[in-house]
Amino acid sequence: MAFITANWNPLGEAFYRKTELYEMCWNLRDGLRDSLVATAPYGGPIALLREPHRRSPSSRPQLEIYFSSGVSVASFPWKSGPVVHLGWTVSDELLCIQEDGSVLIYDLFGSFKRHFNMGLEVVQSQVLEAKVFHSPYGTGIAIVTGSSRFTLATNIEDLKLRRLPEVPGLQGKPSSWLVLSQDRQTKVLLSVGPDLFILDNTACTAVVPPGLSPQAGNIIQMSVSFSYKYLALFTDTGHLWTGSSNLQDKLSEVETKKSTPPRQMVWCRRPKSQQPSVVLMWDKLLMVAGVCQDTIQFPIEDPCVLVGELDGVRIISSSSQELLQEVPLVCQDIFKIASMAPGALLLEAHREYEKSSQKADEYLREIKEQSMLGEAVRQCVEAAGHEYDSNTQKSLLRAASFGKCFLTDFNPDVFVATCRELRVLNAVRESAVGLPLTFTQFKQMTLQVLIDRLVYRQFYPLAIEICRYLKIPDYQGVSRVLKHWASCKVQQKDLTDEAIAKAVCMKVGDSPGVSYSHIAAKAYECGRTELAIKLLDFEARSGEQVPLLLKMKRSQLALSKAVESGDTDLVYTVVTYLKNEMNRGDFFMTLRNQPVALSLYRKFCKLQEQDTLKDLYNQDDDHQELANFYVTASYREKRLESRLSLLQSAVDEYNKAKNEFSVKATEDEIRLLRFQRRLDDEKGAGLLGLSLQGTMEALLALGLNKQAEQLYRDFRVPDKRYWWLKLRSLAEKEEWEELEKFSKSKKSPIGYLAFVEVCVKSNNKYEAKKYVSKVTPEQKVKAHLAISDLEGAADAAIERKNESEIGVVLSRCSTNDRLLMDKLNRARNSIAKK
Amino acid sequence: MAAHLSYGRVNLNILREAARKELREFLDKCAGSKAIVWDEYLTGPFGLIAQYSLLKEHEVEKMFTLKNGRLPSADVKNIIFFVRPRLELMDIIAENVFSEDKMHSARDFHILFVPRRSMLCEQRLKEQGVLASFINIDEYILDLIPYDGDLLSMEYESAFRECYLENDQTSLYHTAKGLMTLQALYGTIPQIYGKGDCARHVANMMLRMKREFAGIQNQILPVFDTLLLLDRNVDLLTPLATQLTYEGLIDEIYGITNGYVKLPPEKFAQKKQGEASKDLPTEPKKLQLNSAEELYAEIRDKNFNAVGAALSKKAKIISAAFEERHNAKTVGEIKQFVSQLPHMQAARSSLANHTSIAELIKDITTSEAFFDNLTVEQEFMTGVDTDKVNTYIEDCIAQRDPLIKILRLVCMQSVCNNGLKQKVFDYYKREILQTYGYEHMLTLNNLEKGGLLKPQTSSRNNYPTIRKTLKLWMEDANEQNPNDISYVYSGYAPLSIRLTQVLARPGWRSIEEVLKMLPGPHFEERQQLPAGLHKKRQQGENRTTLVFFLGGVTYAEIAALRFLSQMEDSGMEYIIATTKLINGTTWVKSLMDRLESQTP
């Protein structure tokens, strides 16, 4: 433990340490010399292109991809054009920017994904230099061409090329340049000799860094910090200027006394840095220059590559990888020699406790006296997070655990979370996985992204273990991993469709949030349509199945899936698609096999395409519906003749449908229409459109009794109805004599109470009386009451000895009818006695 | 405003709040002042979710009804169309948008489909060339709307027609979706029972959708123990019969739409003391009817013959309460009396309203025509002479009574006879066509397709068996103090509710034979609950069943279910859901095809 500070180097007030991350697993014959190297922050992968300028076809340059720890992932000869620059996207894809401006994208495993171009004019002028940069918008590319023009693409996923304005006086490439992402704007900062320019969408503006003396010389190297907040400029006189990237403030100036340009210059900061610094690298020297004007110098042997991180700089050489960072304050507090910080005392206390020494108690008391035990535990936990060595982590966490035993109300959440997360971090730092993340980086990138990164590296089991260990909800964790796994699995060319489908189904099962259609789409992309269909079968959401099936031209299947889902809109989607894709015959045949779809399409046609509807019925020999169709259509016709002919068609179809009733009814309708038209023409009767009953009624009203009579016979109208009709019509016209004659023409099929009531309704009680005597005994009381003949009603009721009828009459009596009431009551009593 | 929704066994206000939240979210998506253009049909249902005040809070300044031509002018930034996904409405919208563009263009157009967006409609807008004019095209998933503390309706008018005549199961899809929403809010329903083809279809879709959501486990303790899905065509008889509960009669006679009824104004004229009666109002009196009104909640489900007694009892209580003031001596007592005044006055005006309504109804129920009609209905239901042409129906046709009345009776006879003899069947049809016009042929066709009016196919009439087994006719129905659901139709116990009742106790196994006679399959499904959500039932705690009527439910049926909930020994509480609140008239109307002649 005493050696923890051994690799600490003071810089101003702070300390810097260099920790070894890996001994590199790779075996590079020529080191990193003569290679294009692409590295990515957050422990990203490394790509190497050896001797990129070798052009003879016999010995093509080799493109190699490694994990951060040097584990080889892919290696293949570069067959495309000369590459100017390599870079990684935020989703671990490799960008190869070629001289002609085309950008090829490969995945982590070296398989080609797609390509795009940085603009046509580039083909002519060629790319001189390119840079890949990251911003909140994603991964971007900037190039400078032979004609000294800059082109920017802020997000390669949503490619929008921006050609920046010309830089006055620039020939060839600038002496140095970089991309700034500030205030939601992406700009280029470049130097031409001693002058500095900012190039944005609209203009090229000359700028002067505050406090940079004019004698400083030409700016030949520049660097911007990870957060784009700080800028460092290096001039050919060895002068290093640092300040804010908006060029408002100066931090410091350092004389490096080096006149050769550094091979690389990178900011080395951490969030809340006490002593930010810039790391400069020459062939044999690595220099850390702090803003306090102090420097630390390390000799180096091999050519190295510096990778700027959020909280430090990784130094990759052919043999090893180290992390150079400012020692976090809390670690300084604990490990600084003779530190009296509570965390340091707690660590000491625990150490003594392990030795079973009573000094443990003394240390503890000392902390407790200052009531700093909580703080001590917090410090130990935090420091553990920042330590890379697992033994150091353990001793710090043990000390914390020991300390919290003496606290009563300590919230263990942070402690537990740190333990868990450190375990995860240690696992991904393993050389085989090669993600040398610091705790700070991990927090910044989030667990979600870490899992994505593991998935890109195809460490599926590890990713799943982590999800389970950290108890991430399935649909954010395990399911997501499984989804990627399955998408990758379907691309395995050496396995049969069955084997893959089975494997996928077994692993994925019903995992929430895994979309089989997504996996199937992947399979289809790789040209495995059969596999895609097999996989789609597992998809529970039809809404997802159907579009893909249509894309794969499995329209029948799509239709049946849509029907299965019950979502009629989805069915309509497929039907509309089929209608456009197929010829009419096939389309109809397809629908025929899907009654639900057919009904929906019919409904649609009813509203939109009447003619198609007819064709559909015709094709299905659905005579009944076809007939109904004609009937409906007949009502839309303006001319009687066409209406009749449509009705005639309906008759034919009803005949074919063996619907005798409808045949008869429609024929009757035709007959009635003809009759009405004839009479309208002859007598102007205005009958057309009336029902048969209405027609007869109108005829009677017009006195055309004979014609009414004729309809009555021709249409075999039931006597009852006709009698009612005639009775009412005569009463309405007050033809009382006719009415009486009619009543005697034969025995009334509707009885005679009707006569009484209709007469009363026409306010003719006198006529009504004539029919009372003819009424059947059962209706006598009612008849008498109808003409307000209480006495008659009473007599009839008493005669019939009907209690309830007596009651009815009684209820109609008023106080004036005392005698009658007595009579009725007496009769009722006598009936009751019996 | 919607407090009555939360009084019941299940707090349906949660559903309403969820719907309101979604509405607010959509409105906020369209920043700035807004005008809403309404598909008129939606205003009623929407009124139950959100009043104008909510819309106003979200900068809705104007409201229009969707109609052809130009939009009325309004100085707003956003125009939002609230529409059902119907093609004919799209054409109107297109016309609106077009004429607007010519005028001034700084407006943003949005469209909100209720309850679901539709590809066909969007395509239609595209064909019309206006699709691109819309900034937001969204859907407002409003499937089940809370109508009362125990009642949900989708107000999907054409559900029955679409399912049985057009083989279009869109409404069932919406039903299934609505039930999923309900389960998301009230927990997975562990048991599903059903009877009928549509019920089966809905249950299948629900189980399927559950698989789609697999993994997003619902961690809500189930509120409903059971879901019962019932096809309307399992019980075609009940809606055809005239409802005899207070609420049922209001609906039969005046029609209740979205919880409101419009009544003839004469009886409601304000008569103030000393003032001569002023001019009678001519606007119909509009009243809201729900359980928020204490008196209405008390009498709505009573047989109408028991309403008078209830009203006079209430009148006595209220006047007694007003008399209290004479007993109030101390300042404290007077203060207490005064504090109760508003409540008492509300009760008094409620009493006045319902007395008036009851009088209006009584005029009708005591008429001879009503009595005759009811007698025939009851004859049919008890199986008297259902195989012959009925004289009363004949007379009614001869008198040209309203067609719907005839259709209701004829259909009822057909249902009670398991189809009419071919001769009787043809006779009725001919009578109807000759009297009301041949244009009703398609309507008759529809009724036949829907199974309401059909020729007898087998010689066996199984209605009597069903009636006897399920005790559909109770001779001694007690209207005043009912002891059986048959009181809602003064003797007839609704078949649908009997099925529900038997399911609860002793179970459907006891009536397998009858179930087989009724159309469609009957089934039971179970949905697995996540561990830890199994209810530990308290002793004596009631179970809750959601009864979903696919194709509509009547107020009398609802009354019967409420009666069952209140029965002390039933051990079951019912919540009712349906595609549409119906009565015989609206139901038959929805099955009619109106052909109008164009020949001059």
Image (spheres, coloured by chain):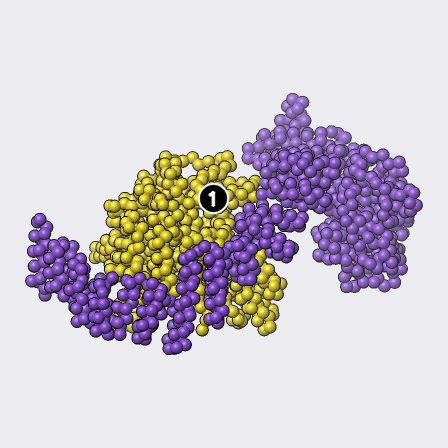
Chain colours: A purple, B yellow
Residue appearing at x 35%, y 54% in the figure: B423
Q: Nearer the viewer, residue A597 or B576?
A: A597
Q: Nearer the viewer, residue A732 or B344?
A: A732
Badge 1 amino acid: Arg
Is B33 located above or below residue A184 in the figure?
below
Is A77 located above or below residue B108 in the figure?
above
Q: Residues within 10 Å of mark 1 (few under 14, many from 20)?
A: many
Chain ID at mark 1: B
Is residue B65 in sight in this rendering?
Answer: no
Q: Is residue B599 left or right of residue A380?
A: left
Q: Residue A483 placed where, x, y %?
A: 65, 41
Q: Residue B231 placed where, x, y %?
A: 42, 47
Q: Which residue is mark 1?
A: B200
Residue appearing at x 84%, y 51% in the figure: A98
Rendered image quadrant of residue B540:
top left
Residue appearing at x 45%, y 52% in the figure: B164
Q: Residue A17 placed where, x, y %?
A: 78, 38
Is residue A220 in sight in this rendering?
Answer: yes
Q: Nearer the viewer, residue B536 or B395?
A: B395
